[in-house]
Each structure stands twice: as structure tokens, then as C-alpha cells.
Image: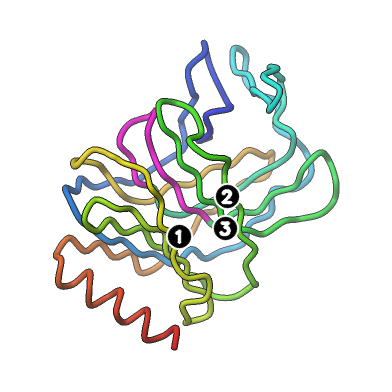
Amino acid sequence: MLAPEVRKQKKPLNNAPMSLIDVKGDFMTLVSVTGDMNPGLDALTLPDGVTYLDVRGQTKKKPPGTFQGAGLILFQDEFNYLRLERTSFTMNGKPILEQKILIEVVKNGRHMIDPIYLDVPEDEMMLGIARRNGRVSCLIVVGNRFGLGTRELLVDFKDNVQVGLSASNVSQKPLDAQFQGFVLLDDTLKIEAALGGLESDKK
């Protein structure tokens, strides 16, 4: 799990597997998220001592639905991070499977803004996080084109952070998170060249 709403002893329970590397200053990272996601309808009963904090501030023993996600994360610490994931989920027991891109910004253990869910077509997909001149952008490339463009976020993280891959599964079904073509650039010229290439694809 990786969500500020899921708490143990009033602290976020962040135990999702991650593979991280240290970065400093500007960077750009890209990855393709592949594989099947099927969280099913059966909500996960949380372990003893773990609760879900709903939008009304009430604690629950079960999340409101099922969720599976995998993608990129910019990780400062367990209370401050940005994640960009391909997700699949259901809500409130309704048999409707949603497939969306999640942008989540957590600062000081809470959502800085409401999580952003973007509709995406079923196609090959590449996700990216870039920081240029201290400003963070999320990149979404669908079907070999700059489909959903960039989302620039006015959010600050420390100069020294970690970036990499993460996956989370809040369901009773297994998740086999799969990634291809992970790239990390920390050279300004290479970052500009890569972004320029994506803009060309958009045209």
C-alpha cells in the first residue's frame, strides 16, 4: 500500500515495494508500464491496527473499493512524494472497472491536492517524471504520441530525492507489475533533447 489514507498508529502505512535511485537537481525518468491489472471486486480487510481514513475523517476497516497501480515515484521520504501510475480500480462494490492514470502529490503525510485521475485509452503507454529548474512535470505518452501531454505541478521537493518504480495492490487478487525500458537522465542537454523528441511526436 502507498496512500496517506491508510494509517497505522496515526502514521501513513507505506509498505509498497519500490526500486529507487538517488538523484540531485534536474532529472527526467521514463518507463513503460505493461501487464494486466485486475483488482476484482473483493475489498481488502486491513490488518489489525491499520485503518482507512475516509473523506469525512472517519476510520474504516476496509477501503471503499479495490485498487492496483504501478508506475513512477519521486520519493523524498514517507511523508513527501509524488507518484504517477497506471491504475485499475473499482469503487463501492460496483462491477465497473476503471482504467486511469493517477497523479498523487503527498506533502507532510497528506494530499497536497486531491488525487488526479486521467482517462486513457487502452494502448501502449509510457509515463515520465521530469524536474527542470526545480519545477516538476508529469509526462504521459500513449500510443507512441504525446497523447495527454504534460502536467506541470507547482510543488517543491528537496534537491536530493530518489526516483524509481513502485507498485501497490489494495485488493485480494495478485498484481504482477511489469515495466519496460526504464530510463533516467540527469544531464540537462539530454533532458531537453528527450523532451524535444516527445514534442516532435506530438506533431
Q: Position of residue 44 (x, y in %)?
A: 70, 32
Comparing 77 with 154, the one in front is 154
Tell us which disc is closer to us: 1 or 3: 1
Tag 2: residue type? Ile
Secondary structure found at label 2: strand
Label at residue 151: 1
Label at residue 178: none
Tag 1: residue type? Arg
How far apart are the two marked residues, 1 and 3, measured between alpha carbons?
12 Å
Tag 3: residue type? Ile
Q: Position of residue 61 (x, y in %)?
A: 71, 20
Q: Which residues are magenta?
A: 74-85
In the picture of the structure, the residue carrying the numbered disc 3 is 101
Residue pictured at 69% horizontal, 39% vertical? 172
Label at residue 116: 2
Residue furthest to the right in view is: 94
| Circle nearer the N terminus (3, 2) | 3
Give the crowd class for mark 2: few <14, some 14-19, many >=20 residues within 10 Å.
few
Secondary structure found at label 3: strand
Residue pictured at 39% horizontal, 28% vertical? 79
| Circle nearer the N terminus (1, 3) | 3
